[in-house]
Image (cartoon, helix red, strand yellow):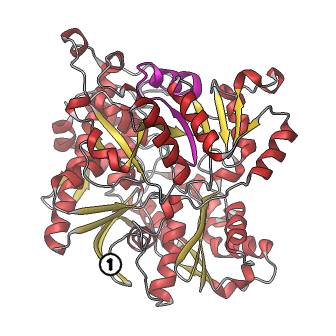
Amino acid sequence: MRILGISAFFHDSAAAILIDGKIIAAAQEERFTRIKHDAKFPKNAVQYCLKAAGVNLREVDSVAFYEKPFLKFERLLETYLNYVPNGLSSFNKAMPLWIKEKIFQKQLIIKELISIDAAFDPLKLLFSNHHLSHAASAYYPSPYDEAAILTMDGVGEWATASMGIGQKDKIRLTHEMHFPDSLGLLYSAFTYYLGFKVNSGEYKMMGLAPYGSPKYVNLIYQNMLDVKGDGSFQLHQDYFAYCTGLVMISQQFENLFKKKTRTPDEPLEQFHMDIAASIQYVTEDILCRITDHLAKESQLSNLCLAGGVALNCVANGKILKRGKFKSLWIQPASGDAGGALGAAFAVHHLFKEQPRSLAIANDAMQGAFLGPSFVPSEVGNVLDAMGAKYHTYEYETMIQKTAEELAAGKAIGWLQGRMEFGPRSLGGRSILADPRSPSMQRILNLKVKYRESFRPFAPSVLKEDVQEWFDLDCDSPYMLLVADVLSKHRYKISSEQEALFGIDKLNAVRSKIPAVTHVDYSARIQTVTFETNPVYYSLLQAFKKITGCPVLVNTSFNVRGEPIVCTPKDAFHCFMGTELDLLVIENALLWKHEQNAMLKKDYKHSFTLD
């Protein structure tokens, strides 16, 4: 049974393919087109998945699309009718696009598929529900044969949150929250207010929150929403404009906080940090109420999460720490990209009624390493064609030299094996550095990533050492859980440092691994095992042998506004456009000082800022 899943036309288009229920390949379209959050039909990703599976499109049994366009159109029309005459300008902008293209998405998808393979049978195209796709992406790859399921995002067709239960082959969704009441849209509204890009900058606001104090929590609760004990809520729409407007918030929103919406080029003030801390607190509170209720109602010990809200790793850590669920599994591609995978699973297990087999290892995602890979001969051909200077080594020597350069304080671009599926670099397409360096966070943010200095970096740690360094007693392979650095590795800071405000807090060295220790002593952790990534695991082991530290800084291999690199060519361009010191692609090592200066690129201004 061959099932191709597709998500497209909103943001983060992607494709995934299953053969007999096993994930063969999955990738986002942005990685191939180099357009961040590319929403177009994922033709390149589809072609990659088919190639990886060794099949033609005509040989696929079904193609599953991740949502139902007509239901989404119904919601759009009904919303405009409910708010007449408000939203007329938005209606006039949206309707021509829907009438010309989006309402006929089925025909558009069929046309795109036939352009890939003229023999494709249109009757093979099926449509899943948006939140069912998220739920399927959360439950079916998980290591559980029974689990509660929670999916939350901005909005699908009508649903903004879904709760249910997965048992063996089946999923049963039992509760929904509907538009316009949406935790994802509430969080995005504050993202917009702080001057960050919606559907892209939410993680910036989460990273900014620890610099502030949640002093506006009561103001938000008293004015913007009514929350029940079970976590369900209603948003007061007077403060928001996303139903009918071209912006997220209304004038009343700004009036409540007595401050205008920040423009992207304005400096961040303590006020903005306090706002971020406040909405993060509200989000965590609502999620904890919902998951507490879900645990009580389901009487299950396992919880699966997906949807864009599931990428809030701080909230995930709080849910786990509460102990209402013994075990938590989060889909690494929780956003719309993962909907492609979930739609394929939904068709395979629910429509085709195929049995489910639990993965022998931790889960069925294979560490999320589901994208393209390149053998050394391909790498050499690409580097030769670009005029790069490189050295090739045997495997053990490559690992040792890379570890030595990391220990010497070098910032390294790292491309090994298959590309990751989802928004996180997990050791396949990563920028790596020494976490012991007090200056590394600033260096990577300002000179390599070309982004805001406050942005935190994540630690990769050998799985067997995680409890020696962090307050976490479970695996976190997908960098989706936040936990504290253990007190024995923290440094006492002075009263002067304690009194610092906002981003000045970065100046205080708080632990033995300051480059990955946030200002509240937390860290977004990735545990690494030999089974899912033997090369990266070996590098961490070698670094530990040299330094005694089993931790590395791991951030995505890209600059601000650029998709994560996919190919050796992408990696070399990014290397030459930043102040990275060394590039490692499979067994090839490239030192910056040896490269032709004429090959240097201006990456600081090459991409639209996110």
Quadrant in the picture for the N terminus: bottom right
* Quadrant including the C terminus: top right
**What range is drawn magenta here?**
428-453
Question: What residue is rendered at 39% in x and 70% in y?
Answer: 135
Question: What residue do we see at 53% from left, 76% from top?
Answer: 22
The secondary structure type at the circle numbered 1 is: loop
Mark 1 highlights which residue?
Answer: 145
- Can residue 73 be seen at all in this image of the molecule? no
| Residue 531 x/y as whole percent | 47, 60
Spot occupied by residue 38 in the image (x, y as percentages of width and height): 63, 52
**Magenta stretch encompasses residue 435:** yes
Left or right: where 94 falls relative to 114: left
Q: Amino acid at mark 1?
A: Asp
Q: Residue 93: x and y, percent?
A: 59, 52
* Residue at (53, 29) in percent of width and height: 406
Tell me if residue 79 comes above or below residue 582 in the rendering.
below
What residue is drawn where x is 77% and y is 34%?
390
- Quarter location, residue 319: bottom left
**Is 268 on the left or on the right of 433, as rendered?**
left
